Amino acid sequence: LLLNENYENEIQRSKHSIKDIVNLGYQHLNLMYKNHSHLPKEELFSFLDERMGKLRFFDNNDGYFFIYDRKSAKVISNAGTPSHVGNSIKNVKDINGLNFYESFENVFKNNKKEGFTSWHWTRPDSKTIEKKIGFLKLFEPLDIVIGSALYTEDIKKNISKNSIAFLSKLKYPDDSYIFIMDSKGTSILHKNKEIIGVPLSKLDEKIQKNVSSIVNKAI
């Protein structure tokens, strides 16, 4: 069995999750604004950063909120990259040359008050650059934007993990079994535990031929 899933449905579900989280963050932001609207703007922004910057979510706690001021393009809060707080994102671009500020502001064209966008960013745990899907929401009383995002690679890994966990529990009355390979022929699930994770090129030549035949038929 080749694990070559169509991730679109799971991505859509994940987008709904991000939206729900941002809506919760928005409600928290609104409550803090109502209780501290008497503060000067800079003091209020500092207070919001102190409170919102402590919030973490998702299974590995790498989820966080980011907030920026639309007029100045300055970051108000960003727990993922605290050094960005107080700096403008007007000229910040991702690896593909995407301007963050322009991309974010495009979400609010035609009087829209929320929406999705995507960009590439460095993972703090591995320093690799991966795609993120984010949801942004306009907080009109202060003309600021709150958002959050997740890495699409995490969505894929979660699907793979769940699929493997389910398939590994399947039992058959005869000697047949299910095994999973990636598109390069590396076993992800197999009754022979010794070949799991072993690159195809390092397997016995007979096994290589069998695997290559299966892959070619499947693709």
Image (cartoon, helix red, strand yellow):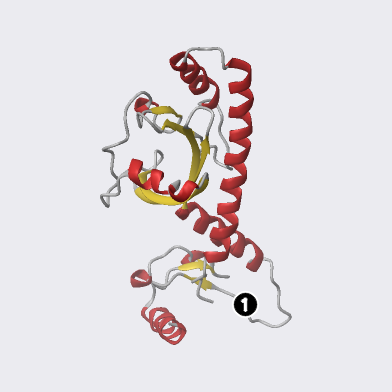
Whole-percent x, y for residue 192 in the image: 54, 69
The answer to whether residue 21 is seen in the rendering is: yes
**Residue 74 or residue 179, whichever sits in front:** 74
Whole-percent x, y for residue 179 in the image: 55, 73
**Residue type of the residue flagged with mark 1:** Tyr
Give the residue drawn at x 39%, y 82%.
Answer: 212
* In the depicted structure, whether residue 1 falls above or below residue 63: below
**Residue 168 or residue 144, whichever sits in front:** 144
Is 219 left, or right, of 167 in this rendering? Answer: left
Quadrant into which the N terminus falls: bottom right
Q: What residue is pinned by disc 1? A: 177
Which residue is at the far front?
Answer: 110
Q: How many marks?
A: 1
* In the depicted structure, whether residue 121 falls above or below residue 69: below
> Dot 1, crowdedness within 10 Å: few (<14), some or many (≥20)?
few
Quadrant into which the C terminus falls: bottom left
**Residue 73 or residue 215, whichever sits in front:** 73
Give the residue drawn at x 32%, y 26%.
Answer: 87
Q: For mark 1, give the secondary structure.
A: loop
Whole-percent x, y for residue 80 in the image: 43, 33
What is the quadrant of residue 203 in the picture?
A: bottom left
Give the residue drawn at x 34%, y 48%.
Answer: 129
Which residue is at the far right?
Answer: 173
Whole-percent x, y for residue 170 in the image: 69, 71
Give the residue drawn at x 54%, y 40%.
Answer: 60
The answer to whether residue 132 is seen in the rendering is: no
What is the quadrant of residue 126 in the picture?
A: top left
* In the depicted structure, whether residue 139 falls above or below residue 47: below
